[in-house]
Image: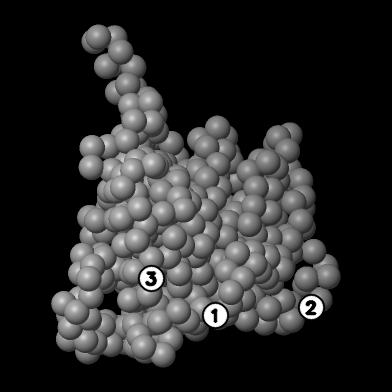
Amino acid sequence: MEFFFGKVCMVVIVCFRFTSLAFETTTDGFSGNGTNLRGNNSNITEDETTGVKQGLDRSIILLGLVSKETYDYVVGIISYAVVPCQILAILFNICIINVFSRKDMETSSQVYLVALSIVELLYCLCSSVAGIMALMYGKKSTDTYAYLWYAARISGFITISIRRSAYVLTFVMTLERFVAVAFPLKFRHFKITPYSKTLCFAIVFVALIIHWPTGFRHDIVSYKTPGSTEIKYRYKDFPFFVANDHIFDGISLFASCVYAYIPLFACLLLNAVTIVAFKAHSRNHNMLRKSTKYPNMVRRERQMTTTLMVSSMIFVILSLPINVSTIVSTWSTDYGIFKREHYLFFMMFRIGYLSEIISNCTDFIFYFILSTKFRRKFLEVYYCYRNKHTPLSGTPSSNSQQTREFNSLRETSSTVTDCT
């Protein structure tokens, strides 16, 4: 038993150290989650032979508000929280997909909830692979071809496209819920399109299309440092992208606005307005609950609406720091990579990256705490699996009178309100 406990502790320590190493090995221009960190530094050039940056006054980064020692201390603390959050996010999103895929969990937002969990799951998996590669190669990872290729082609293209698709999916779900809550009598069955699955696929596909320059503008070339025979690798912009730099910078800005900044701030505004509308119609909902034959079902539907509002609001708030930091670095002359606030920029990036990982965990937590329907279905699904699919006591069986009553309640609920 002691031997087993020691092995478990060793695995946990290795997992924590894995994140620390991954944080120490940020690539030249890209982070582990695909965010472009190059900044606007046109005065910085690279030697064609060695790849060493020229025209960079490194002393300026020592004048910032955050010192390197403070940055290393904060990152050291944050690094130990990333791996547990990633593991929880993967497990939580698998549970959400499994629960909301059930037929008796159908709501107007079911497709979006499942799609959102799928893209969050893929995002965590892609980010974890980048961390595993950083662990494998150590501090030399930024000089290896495989790691640089993954950082540019996957983290800089696939991962960022997936993450920003989650922003748009959240916005679509929030918009539909806002219309249903604000106009419950006229638009209680409102949908942007009846083809929700097609819309979700289109959102991800378009994200991949408009983000492809981010992942393919860099070639990976080899070089040798003076006095060394070791072959290293670095990024070098393709001539085509250099010649049309202003065009692709415009595409990148357009992609950031359409798939990140606008959806996030719009979600924040819509959620605030939805809360106001929800409170304004609370009296009508209370009267409806008293007049209907099935008040508990109306209460559960309102509970689910509240749950989705809270979870989406927290998701947006946790996604804002890294995006706000990127916006500020674009327009500020002192804040960004290789600028005076170099370490402040990277420290805020690490904090924002951790908050994004945490945002992938919060959906399940709020669903489980605030939604009785989700909690019961989750316990039913996983309790039954553990007990050879034996239903919970009090759960309607497939051929009982309880099932017919349960289905009758669901049908009545969908006619009373469809706020979710």
Q: Residue furthest front?
A: 401
Residue holding disc 2: 244
Q: Secondary structure at mark 2?
A: loop
The numbered mark, 2 or 1, whose residue comes first in the sequence reads 1
Query: How far is disc 3 from disc 2 in space, using C-alphas?
Result: 54 Å
Residue at x-position 57% and y-position 52%: 27
In the rendered image, residue 236, in percent from the top left (x then y), is placed at 74, 59
Query: How far is disc 2 from disc 1 in space, using C-alphas?
Result: 37 Å
Residue holding disc 1: 192
Residue at x-position 34% and y-position 76%: 417
Category of crowding for the residue at label 3, using alpha-carbon neighbours closer than 10 angstroms: few (below 14), some (14–19), many (at least 20): some
Please name whichever residue, 55 or 267, is drawn nearer the observer in this view of the structure. 267
Q: Secondary structure at mark 3?
A: helix
Q: Amino acid at mark 2?
A: Asn
Residue at x-position 24% and y-position 56%: 372
In the rendered image, residue 109, in percent from the top left (x then y), is placed at 45, 67
Where residue 414 is drawn, which disc sits there?
3
The numbered mark, 3 or 1, whose residue comes first in the sequence reads 1
Mark 3 and mark 1 in contact? Answer it, CB < 8 Å: no
In the rendered image, residue 266, in percent from the top left (x then y), is placed at 43, 83
Q: Can the viewer see residue 326? A: no
Please name whichever residue, 36 or 12, is drawn nearer the observer in this view of the structure. 12
Please name whichever residue, 263 or 416, is drawn nearer the observer in this view of the structure. 416
**Of circles 3 and 1, which is in front?**
3
Q: Amino acid at mark 1?
A: Ile
Q: Amino acid at mark 3?
A: Ser
